[in-house]
Image (cartoon, helix red, strand yellow):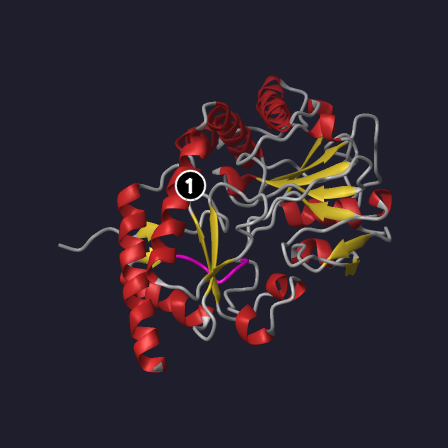
Amino acid sequence: MTRPRAYLDWNASAPLRDEARAAMIAAMGAANPSSVHAEGRAARAIVERARAQVAAALGAGAADIVFTSSATEAAALALGGRDLCAAEIEHDAVLAWTRADLGTGADGRVVLADPARSTLQLANSETGVIQDLPRGLAVADLTQGFGKIAFDFDASGIDMGLVSAHKIGGPKGVGALVLRRGLDLAAQIRGGGQEMGRRSGTENVAGIAGFGAAAAAAAADLAAGVWEKVAQIRNILDTAIASGTKETIFVGKESPRLPNTSYLLTPGWKGETQVMQMDLAGFAVSAGSACSSGKVRASRVLGAMGYGPDDAASAIRVSIGPGTTMEEVERFVAAWLAAYRRFRARAA
């Protein structure tokens, strides 16, 4: 009997939540939320309810949420036309608009000299390493940390944050920019003046409804301690892998780390090869960020942390979630260790 595949790539995209799917289906036939008739007002109510849900999950005010098509668009809206510094570990959507002149330590952590002229991610998508966001920070990519670790935007004292729906079990194609209370910015997409004049274009009502439902469900999971249980399973995975190999490096393990992320670096064993072997064995893992058009490349993040090109090309990311079972992790460990032993035998 063929065993079902195990999805262990939650940092690339979390599976769609039932709550998000139901909200999207209910909103699918909604009218234009800019229309003033009853149908338009009903659509507007859907959008505003979702705005309040996302704001509550972030610890922000509803009026400070600007819906976009993605976190990438939110980055362009926040960073376009500005001269900000970033580290090489940032997402490509951030690096496209910034100067990558901030250093990264071997522990994956970044120290900022001038927060008001810098951008910094809350957590890294590959290593899972969590950063300390200083007050006065200009822009923070909150995408990977949102919904996995406690975070209060208003209390953080940062100016702007980027989030994406599909990282928390919402639909793809929806994101948001969150603004510090009282802060405004000029629209880059001009037209009808939607989103309080900050991002024109008819709102994706169904997608936004799914985002709001996912945000509410994610906040409830976090409050219920769901991610603490995820961390326990991840730690068991790390321990089991470590028991079978003395050379594999758990990148970022000594730093504060997302509860679901393991980044395994085995010198000489190409990450691309590992990803394909695990795929054939029935496990979806990745060699890092999923935002490179399906290409597997040496990790820029590992390079920034001081690893050489060969080592930077020899890592895989295993990222689990609340839906991951202990049985799936045990099967993965057995498959990975079997593949590792074959790799060592060939290298001998």
Image spot of residue 5 (x, y percent): 29, 53
Q: From this view, report whether residue 251 is shown above or below residue 59.
A: below
Image spot of residue 82 (x, y percent): 86, 50
**Furthest residue in direction left, as rendered:** 1
Residue 306 horizontal side relative to residue 336, left or right: right
* Residue topped by disc 1: 321
Residue 308 horizontal side relative to residue 329, left or right: right
Image spot of residue 104 (x, y percent): 70, 57
Residue shown at 53% from the left, 43% from the top: 258
Magenta span: 284-289
Residue shown at 38% from the left, 57% from the top: 242
Q: From this view, report whether residue 10 is shown above or below residue 266.
A: above
Q: Is residue 189 visible?
A: no
Instruction: Provide the secondary structure element on which disc 1 rests.
Output: loop
Callout 1 crowding tier (Cα within 10 Å): few <14, some 14–19, many ≥20 = many
Residue shown at 59% from the left, 26% from the top: 57
Between residue 204 and residue 132, name the one nearer to us. Answer: 132
Q: From this view, report whether residue 220 is shown above or below residue 18.
A: above
Q: Is residue 38 visible?
A: yes
Main SS category, magenta section:
loop
Q: Is residue 52 magenta?
A: no
